[in-house]
């Protein structure tokens, strides 16, 4: 079974924030795949769908960003899920708004959700889709920036980015992650 984890923060006050870009993709995939309703399990909201003849789980950790690894570990332990079957989708300050970047390994790069997943899985090797949120203007605290909504002018780019990230996840279900990276890295916004 494939499983897709979108990182974000629970609660209405965080719903439209930059840090919840991963949740946006999970919601888009749930819509596309006619997923069942989200159920609370493994410190997350989880919905299941059948895609390309295979079961897929859509996961939104409810632990707050810096503890995302607790939910990932709980899911892996409960369902005997393998990390190589996962794709983690999250916001990235070092990628421009509207662009996505796919990777299968590397450090957390300062992202607390990824840092937590690395701590709880013991590896930096897992499939990732990074959603561009750009860096804040000088003088603005990163924590304030990631917990703020996207600017109105950015919304069309964000919508396109969510669509493209969902396309990449769908493509990855029937292709290797290397093939998926070759197709989607560098293509966004061009």
Image (tube, rainbow, N blue to C red):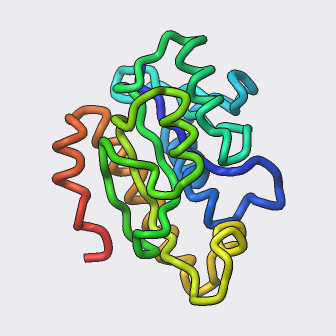
> x, y percentage for residue 49?
52, 27
Q: Nearer the viewer, residue 51 or 57?
A: 57
**Position of 99 compared to 180: left or right?**
right
* Residue at (38, 21) in percent of width and height: 54
* Residue at (57, 81) in percent of width and height: 136
The image quadrant where one finds the N terminus is top left
Q: Nearer the viewer, residue 122 or 113?
A: 122
Q: Is residue 79 above or below residue 74?
A: above
> x, y percentage for residue 139?
64, 88
Number of disc labels: 0
Q: Is residue 32 above or below residue 91?
A: above
**Position of 115 compared to 61: left or right?**
left
The image quadrant where one finds the C terminus is bottom left
> x, y percentage for residue 67?
67, 39
Q: Nearer the viewer, residue 110 or 63?
A: 110
* Residue at (66, 48) in percent of width and height: 65
Q: Quadrant of residue 127?
A: top left
> x, y percentage for residue 52?
34, 28
* Residue at (73, 38) in percent of width and height: 63
């Amino acid at each position: 079974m494939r499983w897709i984890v979108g990182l974000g923060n629970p609660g209405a006050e965080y719903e439209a924030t930059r840090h919840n870009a991963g949740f946006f993709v999970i919601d888009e995939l749930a819509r596309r795949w006619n997923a069942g309703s989200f159920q609370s399990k493994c410190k997350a909201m989880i919905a299941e769908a059948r895609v390309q003849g295979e079961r897929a789980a859509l996961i939104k950790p409810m632990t707050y960003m810096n503890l995302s690894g607790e939910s990932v570990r709980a899911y892996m332990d409960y369902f005997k899920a393998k990390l190589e079957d996962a794709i983690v989708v999250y916001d990235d300050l070092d990628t421009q708004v509207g662009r996505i970047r796919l990777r299968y390994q590397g450090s957390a790069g300062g992202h607390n959700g990824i840092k937590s997943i690395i701590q709880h899985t013991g590896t930096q090797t897992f499939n990732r889709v990074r959603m561009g949120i750009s860096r804040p203007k000088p003088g603005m605290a990163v924590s304030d920036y990631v917990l703020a909504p996207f600017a109105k002018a950015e919304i069309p780019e964000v919508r396109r980015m969510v669509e493209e990230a969902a396309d990449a996840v769908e493509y990855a279900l029937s292709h290797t992650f290397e093939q998926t990276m070759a197709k989607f890295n560098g293509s966004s916004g061009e």
